[in-house]
Amino acid sequence: MAIDWQKEDLNHIWHPCSQMKDYEELAPIVIERGEGINLYDINGSCYKDVVSSWWCNLLGHCNPVITKRLKEQADKLEHVIFANFSHKAVIELCMRLKKFLPKGLSKFNFADNGSSSIEMAMKISFQYFQQIGKPQKKRFMALTDAYHGETISALSIGDCDLYTKIYKPILMDVVRIKAPDCYRCPYNKNRENCQCECFCDCVRQFEKYGDETAAILVEPLLQGSAGMKIYPALYLKKLREICDKYSVHLILDEIATGFYRTGRAFACNHANISPDIMCVSKGLTGGYMPMAIAITTDEIYNAFYDDYNTHKAFMHSHTYSGNPLGASCALGVLDILEQGKIQEELKEKTPYFNELVKNKFLNHKNVGEVRSIGLINAIELVNDKKEKIGFESNLRIGYQIYKKALKKGVLLRPLGNVIYFNPPLIIEKSDMDFVVEVALQCMKEVLD
């Protein structure tokens, strides 16, 4: 008897970040296989995955280099307890990954997802100050509109109401700093000519709370879930300086921005700064296996190094810490990145894609701004272009566009009223042309 896969999915599965009632109208699309940027469902339909399956598919689906690494590792070792045990794949990963990292990052603490690495980073920072004789440093700072994951601590640091609002009664009290908003800049500047005048709010909050703050967490240059909001590298430079002044740890959430998503190995490279702790995940394994790392400095690591009975050890663990299969996939990613071919291709593909999106969308009556960094392109839709007023959320403009694009073979997942492209780095120009044209058609069908 044939199985009705969509029906059985709905009988059993509660999908993430979804109102399941929507699935009565748009049933789950059951994917059979993937290749490059293409996903193929059980009926043979093809979808161009230009959101990298939640931003993690870095080098295409079923990449042969990563797949080979995974298969070889599965034949040797699938998992081992990571306390007092190790294995070659994870050691090699740390040795090779270090070459890509900002200066000073040297110690690797493994988790199995991005939210957990954020949690680890916060706990490391807090415990560090407790152990060096600064117990007053127990606060955390973060930007408005931030997103850092969905554990309770990560939600506390975050500031997107869609995820946090209902949980606010149980969230931590965080010092909130007004994030840069270059599209609606209160100083009437733009990214190209500003001196980050908006940094004044950060200065005020540091003057008030800096002495009692352990760390500030930020998404460097790109606030993803806020609608792919892009801000200048100068803001990060100023942030590094003020953190040094007040002895506050700078924790950079490079989970979504790492591994050449912004055109550089890591977003903070645009500002030529190094964080005290950096969290990576998503592209780390090319989207193959769950793995994340909180990477920190020798200085922080040394504050935890002592006899066991001093209770200075970092007593935080994950069952799948340092998993061999995940580490092997990450090695496959590095095998490709170390060749340099992808980076060379990006030099040509990035300006082509950015100009294509800008030329196709910018003049539309409901497009407020087109913004780009690396291959990431975002189109913010507004109801009133002159006043920069967005559409009401109940109109679900982005969702309407998403449904239409699926019928035309493109997987978009708009963020509210922001359409965006965040494709695998291997995307070809012909695919760029196709997905942009489909997105434009769907947008016009909804808005015109």
Image (cartoon, rainbow, N blue to C red):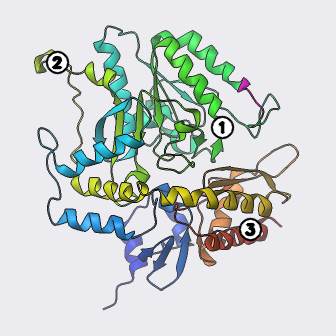
Instruction: Give the distance between the C-alpha atoms of the residues marked 2 and 3, in whole angstroms.
Output: 59 Å
Residue where numbered disc 2 is placed: 306
- Is residue 365 toward the left or the right of residue 141 in the image? right
Residue 219 got which mark? Answer: none
Residue 255: % across, % down: 45, 45
Q: Which of marks 3 and 1 is in front?
A: 1
Residue 343 location (% of width, % of height): 52, 55
Q: Which residue is drawn at 78% across and 33% down?
A: 193
Q: Do we see residue 55 in this rendering? A: yes
Which residue is nearer to you in this view: 96 or 110? 96
Note whether 63 is above or below 16 in the view shown.
Answer: below
Residue 123: quadrant of the picture: top left
Q: Distance between the residues labelled 2 and 1?
A: 41 Å
- Image mark for residue 231: 1
First-in-chain label (2 vs 3):
2
Give coordinates of residue 262: x percent, y percent. Answer: 57, 48
- Which amino acid, mark 1? Tyr
Q: Is the magenta stretch mostly helix, strand or loop?
A: loop
Q: Indicate the amino acid at tag 2.
A: Asp
Name the residue that disc number 3 marks.
Answer: 440
Relative to 41, is 318 on the left or the right?
Answer: left
- Of helix, strand and loop, which one carries label 3? helix
In the rendered image, the residue lying farthest to the right is 386
Residue drawn at point x = 43 percent, y = 55 percent: 337
Q: Is disc 2 placed on a helix, strand or loop?
A: loop
11 inside magenta stretch = no
